[in-house]
Image (cartoon, rainbow, N blue to C red):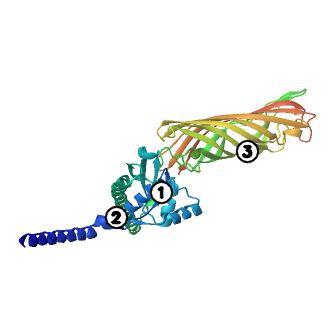
Amino acid sequence: MRRHAGMDWARARLGGLASLLLLGLLFDPATSAAQQRTGVVLDFSGWRSGQARRAVVRAIATQADLQPQAEVQQAAAGMGADLSDPTGMARVAEQRGLDFLVRGEVRGRGGRARTMIHIHDASGNEVAFREAPSPLGRRRLNLISRATVEAWEQAASAIAEREAEEQRRAEEEERRREQEELARLAAEQTGEDDEDDDDDEEVEGALPRLVAMVGIDGRTRKASVDLDPSGGRDYDAGLFPSLTLTLESFPLGTSDSAIRGLYARFDFGVSLGLKSQEEDAMGNLGPELSTTAYQLGIHLGYLYPFEGDAARIGALVGFGVDSFSIDENTTMPSSKYTFLRVGLAADARLYENLLRARADFGYRITFGVGDLSPAFGEDGSASGFDVGIGLYGALDMGLSYGLRFGFTRYSIDFSGVGMGSPAAATATDMTDRSLNVGLQLGYAL
């Protein structure tokens, strides 16, 4: 009787321990999370693949919720998703709400065959793999089920780690957004805006968006024409003042790309108080003649900046007018050269932004010569060129300054008989030259 009572007590104690263990498993977070997983076991391939898949299904079904394999494959076909490809798995998992997918194959035949078990997460990544025996006989099928449980435990741990990492990243992203929002609100309260700060940042090697300068040039003009058969005539204006205006711009000069080299320039100059007098053969001067000279040029081009704007080089194309108007006289008619200019320009920094040097060369394709034709010939054709050098710079406060020198020369060829003005005479060719030197002051942005 004691022996039986002791056995009953032992059985009761073992039963109580089993109940506690069962409750612990039921309320264990990991076990609970595992039972909440939803997945699918896809078709296996190979010899006796059906038996191998059923052993895997029996093992997984105790660990997670399984969706019917036929429904999942039908959904994949409707989406055009390949369940053997990670991308296709991820698409189907998202559409069906799957946490994992199991696929496998049996390699070989008979007792030497091997069962391969692959478990993938919802992103299509393989998170567990096991190799098990041939799906032949109860004992081997049980070993397949045991290998499946081991693979599932590894996969569940990997999936949980991935989810925890995604949660951590989501929380960090949320904190980052909150901090940005707080910073934005603080900037609004203090009248500061991060976007405006970015716009105001000075790009290294930024080019001036606009430079405007006015100044005074000292100019000369000397024209010589060969007449047939009387020899020739000369006109010399001497040195006269000219009021000048120069605007130049790199409209995208603050960009950090090569497009900042786009360049535009406008030049204008008009004479001040210029008069002319004719001189007869005895050296006597005649009455003063009203005389006006002006120059106009509009140019577009590109100057490529090197080494943070240590130097620039490029080309320009523009349109211009060079006019010299004199009241009627018997020596030289008025001239007006309209031209298309194709030029090169080079610029180099000598000392920071306080001193730079620039050189220009331009060829002038001339379309008109004013009253020179028909005065010296029925038709007149001309071409010209100009060269210029300059020193200029700007202070940090924006004050800009420049000193420039220039030379311009036109060559005119005549054909036919001159007529139609008091200065008329038949000529063969003519040269028209001018020099200028000037100072300019202005402001740079």
Which numbered disc flags the more N-terminal residue, 1 or 3?
A: 1
Q: Mark 3: few, some, or many residues within 10 Å (few <14, many ≥20)?
A: some
Q: Nearer the viewer, residue 404 or 231?
A: 404
Q: Nearer the viewer, mark 1 or mark 2?
A: 1
Residue that badge 2 annotates: 34
- Residue 281 in the image: x percent, y percent? 83, 30
Q: Mark 1: few, some, or many residues within 10 Å (few <14, many ≥20)?
A: some
Q: Please give left or right for residue 434 compared with residue 196 in the image.
A: right
Q: Nearer the viewer, residue 66 or 279?
A: 66
Residue that badge 1 annotates: 50
The image quadrant that residue 304 belongs to is top right
Residue 251 visible in the current orientation: yes
Residue that badge 3 annotates: 319
State how far apart marks 1 and 2 are (Cα): 25 Å
Which numbered disc flags the more N-terminal residue, 1 or 2?
A: 2
Mark 3 and mark 2 in contact (Cβ < 8 Å)? no
SS under mark 3:
strand
- Residue 383 in the image: x percent, y percent? 78, 34
SS under mark 1:
helix
Residue 224 visible in the current orientation: no
Question: Could you tell me the amino acid type at mark 1?
Answer: Gly
Q: Nearer the viewer, mark 2 or mark 3?
A: 2
SS under mark 2:
helix
Which numbered disc flags the more N-terminal residue, 2 or 3?
A: 2
Q: Residue at x 56, y 64 (%)?
A: 74
Q: Please give left or right for residue 50 compared with residue 319 in the image.
A: left
Question: Could you tell me the amino acid type at mark 3?
Answer: Phe
Q: On residue 430, which mark appears?
A: none
